């Protein structure tokens, strides 16, 4: 079982550790220290040794940070975690609504006069520290990069992970790393950049066609890489992870111990391309102090990685069919089990079991969200033994999950009724579905970004005075991170959508304390074929749906759907039946036929 | 008659003037000179003395510029004017597709080695010259601000306009200028700015509750103003324009001759707030050379001007009813006259006549666009005696027009069939209508900008492989400019929409060489009332339609409309009938009843 349900922290652990940290800060002449959730790679999941925030405070959410002062310690979390943080931290910690209150604003309010605030320059990006310094300018509050004091007081802190990496077969990667390196190197040459420092493990994994096991859920290996204008790479990664990979990596790839990175940076001829949004402050400073020119730019791998090639598309298509069949096997079971007193944990177990039965599951792509009744309104709900809840007639269950397979990464949400759903729930579900169908059916002229299109999936909710407080969709990798940039269906995303990009299409609706609804398919951006009467000169794009799995018809109020929406849904279900019928368990076939019948 | 149809230039005028200009450039040691359409105020309309581009080249479009070199002279125009420029300029001018080719790129290509390119620093903004200098950096091409050589060789160049300005009555302005000045002055104080230089005549007109007559179509007076942190204003404007306004302006407003502006700037204590996008280079340089600190920021009046107050809303509502009734009187005439051999010019004349009959028309708000048949596909078509075309059975007529009234500015487009329209035209018209209705019916959460919403009005066209190449809507003033920022329904606009803003809602469709379609109403952003089952905590906005005038039912394919779209249209028409019936000519009543019957 990948997922577990035990609470790993208690509120009690916090106070003595906080006291000990404050002693160290005083000894170092610091008035405060920032403890982020992030590691040096700024990903969503961190290794056990990097769980400094949870170790210190007890808070285990996937985003946030603590600001420890002598007399106050704020724990900054966003709306998703405002309830969780109260349950997980002791009274010596003060929850702060972030980003409504930013760290800079809070410091200006809490710190009288001058102060020295420490931070670990490995754990903060250049952009983060720049923003904070701008806010604190003229305040007398100075930011000081220091060796992490938590690492000194955390006695049984685990070692960094050293799990072996593996090669991603060309069959699934679609392009040898030699070609990728040459392609990107020519971009460096064109931009007049000598090399680029890659600090995102999924960028490195994509570039070198490797996958790792350093953290759960995301198949990446921690490390940094320098890609040079001649196409060669210096990889700074514990060599023990790469022992079996010599033939795959070849001679243009030089492996170095991680602690040689900074000396190497000092010896470079610039300009070195760096991404402000992801590069740890310490690495930019190392270059600057050695007089090496920096060229601020985006992550060189981000866009090429986002534009999936034919092999990646074929792989992820297959992974989605496999995963869809596993979902159906689960759903067929759920339909009979739902009202027999099963709990959220039973649901998570059974679903993972169903995916494991494919014999291809390498991990789940994130911890399954199984939120029943009021838990469904907690957008990032993770069930534990403490919160576990039996499903009750009238509940909706929001079930958001995915699998990591060698050929692809999946992410699917279905909302399921337990017993007979209420009318209000059905109306809201149908509006969410209308938005999801509007995005699925969309055709649009090339050049637009997520920020231009996202609203189209919200209009049906807006018309009813409703909305949801998360983006409509995120980018997804191919056997890589389930959250991948830069493409997003978000009002903040100005990166034009391009053929080959994979995104989620996941509108929702949440009534706090009552119920939640979310419907999610993954979609692939592709060129739209010409249409009779269409403008011949316009290059248009459309979405191909990758996810195949029935959408629960009991939750749909047919009278709220337009003809073309019914047509889309019936056609989607017909496709589901056709492509999944040979893949589901024989005991699921009847369920599938029934679940995919026309509305 | 405000509009006229005579061509004011000929291609023949260009060559001798170009030769004379080149002589002056040689004498001055310049290798080239930029001749923009713009005046120092960067508006859409310019005074006769500022028609330098038309005088030199013959090109009369509302946007563009010429780049004169010793052996080549490029005339840069956008897609709207690519045909017109060919007809208007002589062979010594080379049309350039702009902005596909930028001025900087063209110069890099055409100029070998080093060169001194002159420009008039009154006619270019800081942002324009910065962008150009960035492109030319390291090229050996230097930009040199010079006194305008055209003004030396243009012997009968008209004087600057000196038409008297008038006070905008408080009844329509809604807020005394004392209050406006105090309100904005406190914003300056808060931002630590000593004063701001206002260079946009409509900002000054709004701030001081005055209107002018210096140029056609836009009721503004040319001038510059300094608003100080104490709320007082120095106005640099020919005093002759303000002779009757002393009581209105009061003692906190000091009027100065325009030529005292630069000496005054030199004597200021900064920081002076300036908008890079609109401030003439020479004024920023004057400050910089005198060591006065500059604070780059947006036009301080832009947002307050865009948020119309209750009096402005009441005024423009009344202006739209008056204008809608005049439109109906025209349309009733048109229905019988359309197939009697009338021309585009007849249409423009009759429509202006109908608006004049209100006895309230102060000007038209822009030159009426009356494009029949293939002319309808020319988005900014202006009929002249040369292009005038008789309406023919089967034509569509795109009729885009508006009026300037003391209480408001209108802008309306209706597309009208001549005889029986074709099926393809009706289908496209209905899709445009669907988009227009989608925007009209929209409700959305506060905080979103035009770039987030515009696509909603395009989806029906996109689904058919069609689109249109202009924004969905622009901001509109109240007895001010018909094109007003910063609010826009455009993929480029990131300014959140706020209650009180007025925008156009004008999707279209254009088949070059065949036909055009556009439907335009003005809409007002307002708070949306709560809805049963809506999220209680969400502040939502909606649009109130200001324009009332029937949409031609003969062009609608009812089978393509959803029930709620039919409901919207029937309800809109019912309202039109109710609010206009007492205002139209008695001979129009029957037409109105018929035109507003349910679908």
Image: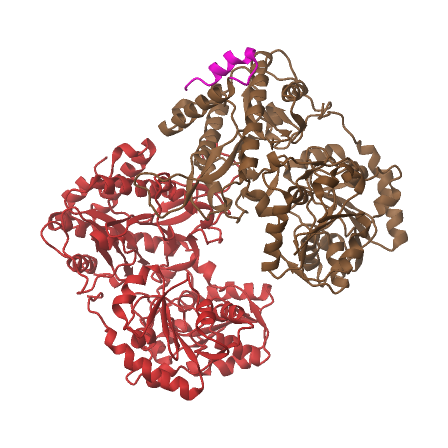
Chain colours: A brown, B red
Figure quadrant of residue B463? top left
Residue drawn 88% across the image and 52% down it: A26
Q: Nearer the viewer, residue B257 or A150?
A: A150
The percent coordinates of residue B116 (x first, y second) are: 48, 80
Span highlighted in magenta in the image: A582-599
Res B575 seen here: no
Task: Say whether residue A590 is magenta.
Answer: yes
The percent coordinates of residue A107 (x first, y second) are: 73, 53
Apparent side of residue A306 relative to residue A562 in the rendered image (left or right): right
Task: Say whether residue A34 is magenta.
Answer: no
Quadrant that contains the N terminus of chain A: top right
Apparent side of residue A87 relative to residue A444 in the rendered image (left or right): right
Q: Nearer the viewer, residue A373 or A172?
A: A172
Residue drawn 55% across the image and 47% down it: A492
Vertical placement of A81 versus B261: above or below?
above
Res A25 seen here: yes
Residue drawn 68% across the image and 45% down it: A204
Figure quadrant of residue B96? bottom left
Q: Nearer the viewer, residue B141 or B400?
A: B141
């Amino acid at each position: 079982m990948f997922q577990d349900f035990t609470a790993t922290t208690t509120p009690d652990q916090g106070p003595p550790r906080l006291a000990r940290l404050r002693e160290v800060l005083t000894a170092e002449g610091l008035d405060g220290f920032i403890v982020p959730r992030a590691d040096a790679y700024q990903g969503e999941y961190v290794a056990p040794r990097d769980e400094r925030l949870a170790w210190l405070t007890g808070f285990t959410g996937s985003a946030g940070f603590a600001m420890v002062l002598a007399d106050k310690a704020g724990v900054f979390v966003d709306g998703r975690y405002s309830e969780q943080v109260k349950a997980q931290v002791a009274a010596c910690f003060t929850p702060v609504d972030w980003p409504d209150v930013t760290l800079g604003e809070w410091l200006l309010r809490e710190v009288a006069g001058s102060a020295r605030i420490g931070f670990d320059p490995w754990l903060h990006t250049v952009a983060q520290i720049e923003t904070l310094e701008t806010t604190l300018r003229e305040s007398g509050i100075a930011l000081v990069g220091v060796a992490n004091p938590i690492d000194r007081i955390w006695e049984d802190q685990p070692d960094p992970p050293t799990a072996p990496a593996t090669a991603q077969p060309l069959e699934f990667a679609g392009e040898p790393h030699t070609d990728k390196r040459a392609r990107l190197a020519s971009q460096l040459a064109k931009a007049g950049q000598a090399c680029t420092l890659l600090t995102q493990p999924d960028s490195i994994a994509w570039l070198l066609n490797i996958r790792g096991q350093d953290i759960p859920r995301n198949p990446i290996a921690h490390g940094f890489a320098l890609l040079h204008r001649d196409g060669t790479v210096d990889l700074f990664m514990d060599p023990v992870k790469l022992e079996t990979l010599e033939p795959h990596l070849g001679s243009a790839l030089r492996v170095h111990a991680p602690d040689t990175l900074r000396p190497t940076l000092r010896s470079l001829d610039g300009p070195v391309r760096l991404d402000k949004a992801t590069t740890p402050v310490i690495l930019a400073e190392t270059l600057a102090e050695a007089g090496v020119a920096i060229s601020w730019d985006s992550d060189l791998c981000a866009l090429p990685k986002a534009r999936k090639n034919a092999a990646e598309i074929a792989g992820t298509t297959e992974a989605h069919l496999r995963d869809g069949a596993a979902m159906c096997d689960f759903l067929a079971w759920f339909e009979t089990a739902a009202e027999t007193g099963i709990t959220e944990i039973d649901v998570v177990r059974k679903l993972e079991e169903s995916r494991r039965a494919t014999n291809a599951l390498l991990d789940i792509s994130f911890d399954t969200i199984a939120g029943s009744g009021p838990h469904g309104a907690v957008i990032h709900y993770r069930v534990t033994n403490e919160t576990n809840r039996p499903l009750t007639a009238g509940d909706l269950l929001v079930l958001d999950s995915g699998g990591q397979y060698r050929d692809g990464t999946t992410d699917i949400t279905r909302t399921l009724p337990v017993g007979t759903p209420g009318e209000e729930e059905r109306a809201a579900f149908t509006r969410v579905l209308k938005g999801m169908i509007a995005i699925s059916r969309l055709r649009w002229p090339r050049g637009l970004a997520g920020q231009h299109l996202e609203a189209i999936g919200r209009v049906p909710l807006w018309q009813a005075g409703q909305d949801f407080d998360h983006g409509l969709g995120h980018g997804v990798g191919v056997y890589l991170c389930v959250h991948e940039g830069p493409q997003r269906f978000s009002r903040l995303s100005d990166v034009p959508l391009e053929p080959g990009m994979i995104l989620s299409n996941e509108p929702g609706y949440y009534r706090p304390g009552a119920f939640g609804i979310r419907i999610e398919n993954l979609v692939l951006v592709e060129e739209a074929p010409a249409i009779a009467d269409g403008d011949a000169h316009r290059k248009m794009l459309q979405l191909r749906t990758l996810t195949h799995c029935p959408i629960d018809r009991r939750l749909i109020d047919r009278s709220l759907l337009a003809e073309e929406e019914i047509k889309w849904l019936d056609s989607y279900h017909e496709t589901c039946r056709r492509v999944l019928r040979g893949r589901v368990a024989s005991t699921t076939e009847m369920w599938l036929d029934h679940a995919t019948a026309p509305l």
